[in-house]
């Protein structure tokens, strides 16, 4: 079922020189919430400097898989992960690894804009403060806001509440907050689903700029968006044959190949809108 | 008014429907007004009954420190002091424990402990136990709220026969060792400020815990996610994001509990010592406005002047609690409005 580009040696260890471009290698065998098996057999490499998109119908587990990459699911009681996720050659699910530390290297932007009920400035410096960073906050705030293409709109009101901004601005503030701590990877869980088309466009343009510095993984419901922003696309689907609703990876490849010449019938049906 | 009523299905409301609708509206409006009128009537009645005392004693009533029915000298400063002192003490203790309970209930600490215990026994997915973590949280929440259902006089009994004997040796040891600290300046001979405040703290705990819990629950989960997603620990998230966001609601809870503590009567009348004096010592007996009223109304019957004096004291107490409650309600209202931008 799993189909990936042949040049990506997935079965080799992360130290294989061919894999030097792979920042995160997710090898998920099974994922449970309590007794419910949510996802199975999903192996996704996230390559450096690229945008990797996860597409698929609702309930196929694409957000769940994304949240495995920085151990956000650990916050859910009953969550069980069987497999491993290698980040820079280390398994982040190894018992000795602190999930809090993982999240400092792999940042996240959520579906709903979620700025804190504090000033724009403090929203950005929050990550620095918890990391114990002592230095020039002003400079980092400006850099992060410029990086999120928000600086010109908010430079005169940094002391105002982050909640006073519009939805699109709030989401870019959240992106600025995430990149202020300079993570290596940025996970985006449907970052545009609560935004209007203009704000969506701005965030999409931003992604193309951000991938120069950061590796991005994005979950999206919008197939045009995946085609516009993603270098590689993973298509996931729901398996209902074993009684439950278990998501799995159908195939993964270059975005153009997935949308124009998919290998699997499921993918072809889904992208042409013919799915049962 | 003529409408086309040719339809088989829709008909205009019948006379009965119209009359009962109108009747219900008038009835509920009447009851709403009745509530307001009762409050105004009580205030007016107490105000007018206390006018003679206001004329006789004036502002000196609030600053006087003697209460002597024989000489006709009345001042309630020690009672005002005792009311505020016992309430603030109780509030300090009650807030610490109440907010801690609210955090424990909302942040999933208890549920996690239960879940991890079950997991050790490999029972976490057993159908009997799968709901146990949530059930334990609900149980504890209900237990805390049950504290509000215990009658005041029972608290008083518990205070006299359990709390006082229990804390007395420690208090007296503290007094003997550190008597130079003003708060420990006198021994605890029985009733006093500290036992009264301790019991009062337990009594206002459910108010603080329940309203703080609501405030913490209404912090949107997406803010927790945002904080964890930036690599914050649970503790950092709690201190830097959750508590500040819920601060308005928690503060409102504290003010409402303060209002409750100020007016609490029976337990305090039994525990505070009813001594007409002002002292910062935690172990000294004192008095509160509410217990002053409770202890003196029986002898006042017939004596117009004494009734007026008690009414005046009641008016002062009512003014204090009314103001405190209004401030609390306002703060809560503003806090919920402030959170709207987050949802």
Image (tube, grey):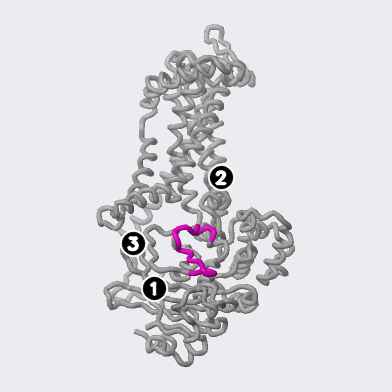
- Marks 3 & 2 on one chain: no
Instruction: Identify the residue at image location x=56%, y=7%.
Output: B71
Mark in front: 3 vs 2? 3
Q: Residue furthest top?
A: B70
* Chain letter, disc 1 residue: A
Residue B312 image position (x, y, % from top left):
54, 23
Going from N to C along the chain, the mark reached first, 3 or 1, is 3
Q: In terms of depth relative to the viewer, which is nearer, B106 or A264?
A: A264
The numbered disc on residue B330 is: 2
Residue at 53% over, 19% down: B174
Q: Nearer the viewer, mark 3 or mark 1?
A: 3
Q: Which mark is residue A34?
A: 3
Dot label at residue B226? none
Q: Is residue B326 magenta?
A: no
Farthest residue to the bottom: give it: A261
Label 3 and label 1: CA atoms lie apart by 16 Å
Q: Residue at x 37, y 83 (%)?
A: A1
Residue that mark 1 sits on: A59
- Secondary structure at badge 1 equals loop
Residue at the image point whose x is 54% and y is 69% from the top: A88
Q: Is residue A67 visible?
A: yes
Pair 1/2: label in front: 1
**Cα separation between marks 3 and 2:** 43 Å
In the displayed structure, does residue A127 sit left or right of residue A141? Answer: left
Percent position of residue A192, x then y: 54, 74
């Amino acid at each position: 079922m799993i189909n990936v580009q042949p040049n990506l040696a997935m079965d080799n260890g992360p130290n294989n020189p061919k894999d030097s471009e792979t920042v995160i290698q997710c090898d998920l065998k099974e994922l449970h919430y309590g007794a419910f098996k949510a996802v199975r057999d999903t192996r996704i490499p996230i390559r450096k400097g690229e945008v990797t998109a996860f597409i698929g119908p609702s309930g196929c587990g694409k957000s769940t898989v994304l949240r495995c990459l920085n151990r956000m699911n650990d916050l859910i009681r009953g969550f069980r992960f069987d497999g491993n996720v290698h980040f820079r050659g280390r398994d982040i699910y190894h018992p000795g690894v602190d999930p809090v530390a993982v999240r400092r290297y792999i940042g996240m932007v959520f579906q709903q804009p979620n700025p804190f009920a504090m000033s724009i400035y403090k929203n950005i410096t929050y990550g620095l403060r918890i990391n114990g960073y002592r230095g020039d906050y002003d400079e980092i705030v400006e850099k992060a806001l410029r990086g999120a293409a928000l600086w010109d709109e908010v430079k005169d009101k940094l002391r105002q509440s982050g909640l006073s901004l519009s939805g699109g601005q709030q989401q870019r503030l959240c992106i600025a907050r995430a990149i202020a701590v300079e993570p290596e990877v940025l996970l985006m869980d449907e970052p545009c689903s609560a935004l209007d088309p203009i704000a969506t466009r701005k965030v999409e343009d931003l992604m193309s700029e951000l991938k120069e510095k950061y590796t991005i993984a994005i979950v999206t419901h919008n197939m045009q968006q995946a085609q516009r922003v993603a270098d590689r696309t993973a298509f996931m689907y729901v398996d209902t044959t074993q009684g439950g609703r278990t998501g799995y990876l159908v195939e993964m490849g270059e975005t153009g190949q997935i949308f124009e010449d998919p290998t699997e019938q499921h993918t072809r049906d889904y992208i042409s809108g013919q799915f049962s | 008014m003529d409408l086309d009523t040719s339809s088989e299905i829709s008909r205009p409301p019948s006379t009965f429907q119209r009359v009962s609708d109108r009747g219900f509206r008038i009835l509920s409006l009447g009851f709403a007004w009745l509530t307001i009128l009762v409050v105004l009537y009580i205030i007016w009645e107490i105000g007018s009954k206390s006018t003679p005392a206001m004329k006789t004693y004036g502002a000196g009533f609030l600053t006087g420190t003697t209460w002597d029915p024989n000489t006709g000298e009345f001042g309630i400063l020690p009672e005002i002091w005792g009311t505020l002192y016992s309430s603030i003490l109780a509030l300090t203790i009650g807030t610490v424990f109440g907010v801690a309970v609210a955090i424990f209930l909302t942040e999933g600490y208890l549920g996690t402990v239960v879940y991890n215990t079950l997991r050790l026994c490999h029972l976490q997915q057993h159908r009997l136990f799968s709901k146990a973590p949530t059930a334990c949280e609900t149980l504890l929440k209900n237990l805390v709220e049950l504290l509000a259902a215990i009658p005041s006089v029972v608290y008083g009994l518990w205070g006299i026969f359990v709390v006082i004997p229990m804390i007395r040796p420690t208090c007296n040891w503290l007094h003997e060792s550190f008597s130079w600290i003003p708060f420990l300046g006198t021994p605890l001979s029985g009733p006093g400020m500290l036992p009264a405040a301790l019991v009062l703290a337990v009594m206002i705990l459910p108010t603080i815990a329940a309203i703080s819990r609501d405030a913490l629950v209404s912090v949107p989960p997406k803010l927790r996610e945002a904080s964890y997603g930036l690599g914050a620990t649970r503790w950092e998230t709690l201190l830097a994001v959750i508590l500040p966001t819920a601060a308005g609601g928690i503060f409102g809870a504290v003010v409402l509990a303060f209002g409750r503590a100020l007016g609490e009567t029976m337990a305090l009348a039994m525990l505070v010592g009813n001594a007409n004096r002002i002292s910062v010592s935690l172990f000294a007996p004192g008095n509160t406005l509410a217990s002053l009223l409770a202890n003196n109304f029986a002898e006042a019957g017939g004596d117009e002047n004494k009734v007026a004096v008690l009414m005046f004291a009641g008016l002062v107490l009512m003014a204090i609690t009314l103001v405190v409650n209004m401030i609390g309600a306002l703060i809560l209202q503003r806090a919920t409005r402030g959170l709207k931008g987050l949802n």
